Image (cartoon, rainbow, N blue to C red):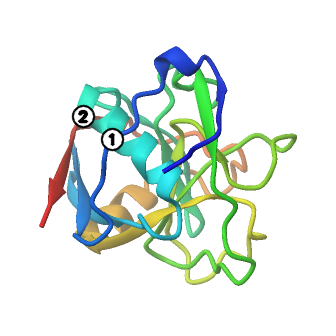
Amino acid sequence: MNCEIGGDKSKADLADLDQDKTNSVVVETDKGSFTFELATKTSPCTTAAFAGLVKKGFFDGLTFHRIVPGFVIQGGDPQGNGMGGPGYSTVDAPPQDTQYKKGLVAMAKAQNEPAGTSGSQFFVVTGPDVGLPPDYAVLGNVTDGLDVVEKIGKLGNPADPAGTPTEKVTIDKMELTTG
């Protein structure tokens, strides 16, 4: 796999994922757990970078800093304000027919970054079809615990477009599983 790394390349630690196996991430939060299967074929660089961060314990103790009911829950920012990341990025442009529907996990990016750019911030779609353009690298799909995602998704103020949580939601631990 040949991945383009932006930023501090020395910080990138891409996991070697077997694309012929099911690679999943278990997200343990203080509100319950959910699991999503990594989209290794659609986004090989994004999933390898994310899995590398999971293996390092990068996400353990971080929060879902943005919760917009009926839209997304977003986490993975070490600063907790939507501005932080791991110090590097990868790019996997999503397919043009990508639809961001409930349970899809994708990578957040800044408006000025190319489509498919990702660092460590990710979001889980909580609405039926949120109508986003195909700009966000696909990380995977929730396979277990969608009820937990929905519960977290209700902990935002619908009148606050910034998505400030009404209650702190902590990611206790993330774990990579292969089966």
Identity of the residue drawn at 54% across and 40% down: 121
Marks 1 and 2 sit apart, C-alpha to C-alpha, by 8 Å
The correct choice, above or below, for 167 with respect to 151 in the image is above
Q: Which residue is mark 2?
A: 55
Q: Which residue is mark 1?
A: 15
**Discs 1/2, front:** 1
Q: Residues within 10 Å of mark 1 (few under 14, many from 20)?
A: some
- Residue 10 % position (x, y): 50, 15
Amino acid beneath label 1: Ala
- Residue 158 % position (x, y): 63, 58
Quarter of the figure that contains the C terminus = bottom left
- For this rendering, which residue is in front, 141 or 19? 19
Identity of the residue drawn at 34% across and 44% down: 51
Q: Residue 53's quadrant in the figure?
A: top left
Q: Are marks 1 and 2 in contact (CB under 8 Å)?
A: yes
The correct choice, above or below, for 145 with respect to 153 in the image is below
The correct choice, above or below, for 1 with respect to 154 in the image is above
